[in-house]
Amino acid sequence: MQAEYKDLNAEFRSIDYVNLTLHEQMKNTIESDMIISMHGAGLANVIWTRPMTTVVEIFPKPKKRWGYRNMCQFVGCDWHLFRGGQDIIFNKDLEDVNKVIPYDEWMAFFRPLFQKAYGAFNEQQALLRGEAS
């Protein structure tokens, strides 16, 4: 994805919050315009997002849980659900699931969300510079 958007003022980072302090987790989350995560406890950090942050929650296909969606609605995030790709299930209780997502399938889902978020960011920056939109 970095190669696809290399000409834009955008940074893509993969962050494992497990070994970060709470302060580091909060800082990374607050500074993010878009958060993409598998469904799980790590999404609790969306409580630190700014309103209108785009959040993509990647679910295993059979799982239906709405707690993080509700949290995103509470803080004003732009929440989206992705169930595509292929689930790789390691046990029957669906608590240990990996996912393989073909690049083209992911980009068909992600590209419009990124374009919307990037456009909103640019509009916000123009307003901060005092430029009319």
Image (spheres, rainbow, N blue to C red):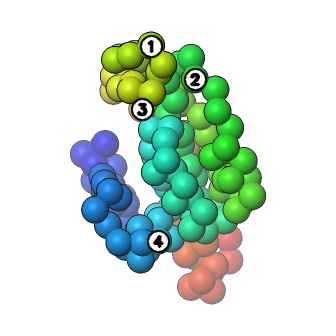
Give the label on residue 92, or none. Answer: 1
Give the spatial CA distance, label 2 vs label 4: 27 Å
Give the label on residue 26, or none. Answer: 4
Give the spatial CA distance, label 1 vs label 3: 30 Å
Name the residue located 50 percent from the left edge and 38 percent from the top edge: 39
Element on which disc 2 rests? loop
Give the label on residue 107, or none. Answer: 3
Circle 2 residue: 63
Sequence-wise, the earlier of marks 3 and 4 is 4
Q: Position of residue 84 (x, y in %)?
A: 49, 21
21 relative to 10, above or below: below
82 relative to 2, above or below: above
Give the spatial CA distance, label 1 vs label 4: 34 Å
Q: Nearer the viewer, mark 1 or mark 3?
A: 1
Give the spatial CA distance, label 3 vs label 2: 22 Å
Q: Amino acid at mark 4?
A: Met
Asked if the residues shown at circle 1 and circle 4 are in contact, with their CB atoms under 8 angstroms apart, the answer is: no
Element on which disc 3 rests? helix
Q: Locate the N terminus by quadrant.
A: top left
> Would residue 3 appear left or right of 112 to someone viewing this image?
left
